[in-house]
Image (cartoon, rainbow, N blue to C red):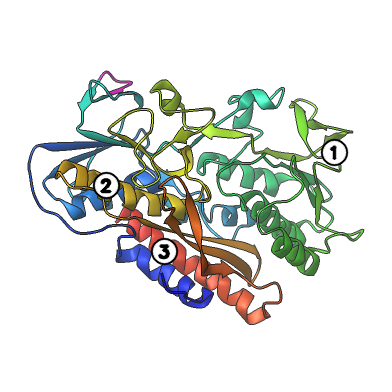
Amino acid sequence: MSKINRRDFVKLSGAVAAGAMVGVPHIAKAGSGKKVVVVGGGTGGCTAAKYIRLMDSSIDVTIVEPNKHYYTCYLSNEVLSGDRTIDSIRFGYDGVKKYGVKVVHDYATSIDASAKVVKTKSGQSIPFDQAIVSPGVDFKWEAIEGYDAKVAETITHAWKAGPQTTTLRKQLEAMKDGGTVIIVAPPNPFRCPPGPYERASQIAMYLQHNKPKSKVLILDPKDKFSKFGLFTKAWKKLYGYQTDNSFIEWMSAADGGAVSALNAKAMTVSAELEEFKGDVINIIPPQKAGKITFDSGLTKGDWCPVNKKTFESTLQAGVYVIGDAASAAKMPKSGYAANSQAKVAAAAVVDYLNGREPGEPSYVNTCYSIAGKDYGFSVAAVYKLSADGKTIAGVKGAGGLTPGDASAETLKREVTYAHSWFLNITSDVFG
């Protein structure tokens, strides 16, 4: 693969989401009576369903998804600062249906790879020849004493965007000036590695303009995080980081930042060395693959092992796992990674149903972070399959990271790119 510079890659990645099929070897029209069921109507699931229909309109494709609307996690942090409305990250399924995809609003409870049927909460049994699973993440509630799904209705994680995002925003608005917002970050691996730190930035921006005596405290079980240098530089410039008047304080694992317990009534969290009291607490728990993957025999440990060429499960033949739930080597658990993986899996499914060997895949990812007004940065990467087919690794010289010495104009432009990317990918995913 020839090298491309980072600026060209960012332009390409924004445009390619709207129309190109990453990893799709060719277009096919053949056969009849072929059924594919896609479990999960998020970024990965909708992309896979749509592109299967684009590649072979004879294939019957059904999405099983309980919710009538999907809220994107990407750019949801802007809702917390007030720079974006919750409605702007909400998408329905009418666009996907225009491609001939059927959408069943029901909970998928199990995937039987032997009988080739997806069973649902309402009692439906939906047959398939091939199935694609894109369930996102679930949470390891047991990791933090005193925290569970019920408590999370008020002490939110907001790591699945939607109602909890709105709740967290309202809590920030109601907090008195001089209050402390505690963000408990999760251990690796987790959905959207830079997300907690972008969230801290967006909340700090809101506090700076509306509650200037307040601050954000990040308690972290890690000693470093994604885009560490870019975030800390932004925090120093925008929010007085590491000064007495900083809007953001970050406590690493080495400093005792790992949280073990929550007292919801007292609004305190217990870390390794001390207890912290917050006016607003946002706990992002440790994560694992979505529940249905455990119920369907698709997991090894916390995640789902897959054939890196096709994303077919290595544990259940004929079932493909994409997005956050999959073990995808060097690819992060991000929305754009799920979009890219979905196209690879869709192509493999079409090839399989038409009696062909899957083509050679390629994969991409772009991740933007908006740290403040007119201040953004990104990481972009192109990936390829190793010669032995066991690893997905970055292509040297392709993609890149926003330079640490980027100009103010470049940082401002990154915000524009981020918003453009959002429009492109959501158009690509949801039609």
The residue at the far top in this view is 123
**Residue 69, quarter of the rendered image:** top left
Q: Could you tell me how far apart the alpha carbons at marks 2 and 3 are, in whole angstroms?
A: 27 Å
Residue that badge 3 annotates: 423
Instruction: Tell me the number on the disc at residue 256.
Output: 1
Q: Which residue is mark 2?
A: 348
**Relative vertical location of residue 152 with respect to residue 373 in this rendering, above or below:** above
Question: At numbered mark 2, what does the secondary structure look like: helix, strand or loop?
Answer: helix
Q: Name the residue: 83% across, 36% down.
A: 277
The part of the chain drawn in magenta is 118-123
Tell which of 374 and 322 is nearer to you. Answer: 322
Q: Residues within 10 Å of mark 1 (few under 14, many from 20)?
A: some
Residue 407, percent from left and from top: 67, 80
User: Is residue 121 rendered magenta in the image?
Assistant: yes
Q: Can you tell which quarter of the image residue 323 is in?
A: top left
238 over 389 or under it: above or below? below
The disc at residue 227 is none
Q: Secondary structure at mark 3?
A: helix
Q: Nearer the viewer, residue 121 or 82?
A: 121
Mark 2 vs mark 3: give the one in front: 2
Left or right: 189 as drawn, with respect to 348: right
Residue 385 seen: yes
